[in-house]
Image (cartoon, rainbow, N blue to C red):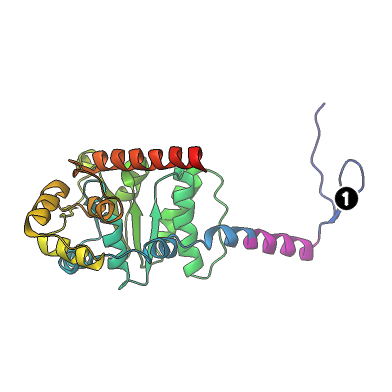
Amino acid sequence: MELSSQEANVIYNVRGDLRIEHTSETIELLAKKKQENLNNIYSTSYIDILREDLSNKKLVVRALEIETIEGLYDELSQFIIHGVPGIGKTVLINQFTEQHSNAVYISAKNKSPLSIFSYLTNKIRRLNNEDLLECENLEYSQNALRAELQKTEHLFIVDDCEKDFETAKYLIGLDKYKSKFIFITREIEIFKPCNIHSYPLSPFSEDETKIFLAANNITLDIIEFNNLYLSSKGNPLYLYYFSKYQVNSLPKDIQSYQDSIWSITAVAFIFNAIYY
């Protein structure tokens, strides 16, 4: 049986216990409610969450690296920062954005392409005091973002790009107009065909390592410091582990340190389970 559609000023459900008046006031109310729901979704500021996560950590301000990033930002419409895990890419970009109030940050980790495009699109629309969009499919969200980029002048930072190469590649290929994009990844090889300027983030220098140790109230003699710097290779995450978890011998790399930490915490858990 074929059903034809009808227009009516009053709509009832099948049971007849729900009545919706199809008036301009109702339409306006529904539209307002929809905007409230979208605003609840897209009012989230990932950069504020990032800053909160890092606020209690004793971090080294990498002035020379920030100066280099500032130079690239002034010169280029987009570039990609890369480095091994724990090298401090996200921390550096957090320090960099302290001087850029127009920054919009998102990580590709645990997010769908649709959510990434929708978030960037609606962040622009919120900043422009425009109604937010409900992006129902990927193509719509991509087209919407292309349109929104034509009327904004902001810095967009996309972190953990190796988690979604195709989305990052699409964003790299967009016309940036007056906006700028910084991409962050730990795997630069996959982005070489994208023809984007890349910047390798350096590990801590010996002086930066000493600053970090001093900030965490760690005192080492020359031999101990040299052994630590050689083992850590100046990796900030390795040094953070060292400041929190003392092991019998220095692990050879980040993964080994994480394995050692797991062993320590596992033993502590078993001990507590037995004696408490």
Residue shown at 37% from the left, 72% from the top: 101
Q: Is residue 26 left or right of residue 41?
A: right
Q: Residue furthest right?
A: 16
Give coordinates of residue 107: x percent, y percent: 39, 51
Q: Which residue is mark 1?
A: 18
Query: Magenta stretch: residue 82 in it?
Result: no
Q: Is residue 269 above or below residue 18?
A: above
Please name whichever residue, 1 or 210, is drawn nearer the observer in this view of the structure: 210
Mark 1 neighbour density, 10 Å: few (under 14) some (14–19) many (20 or more): few
Q: Is residue 199 above or below residue 48?
A: above
Residue shown at 11% from the left, 56% from the top: 225
Specify the segment rendered in magenta. 23-36
Give coordinates of residue 163: x percent, y percent: 35, 41
Secondary structure of residue under mark 1: loop
Give coordinates of residue 185: x percent, y percent: 27, 47
Name the dominant secondary structure of the magenta segment.
helix
Q: Is residue 141 left or right of residue 65?
A: right
Quadrant in the picture for the N terminus: top right
Q: Residue furthest front?
A: 275
Q: Is residue 19 left or right of residue 229?
A: right
Please name whichever residue, 27 or 265, is drawn nearer the observer in this view of the structure: 265
The total of numbered circles placed on residues is 1
Please name whichever residue, 200 or 242, is drawn nearer the observer in this view of the structure: 242
Give coordinates of residue 260: x percent, y percent: 29, 40
Residue type at mark 1 is Leu
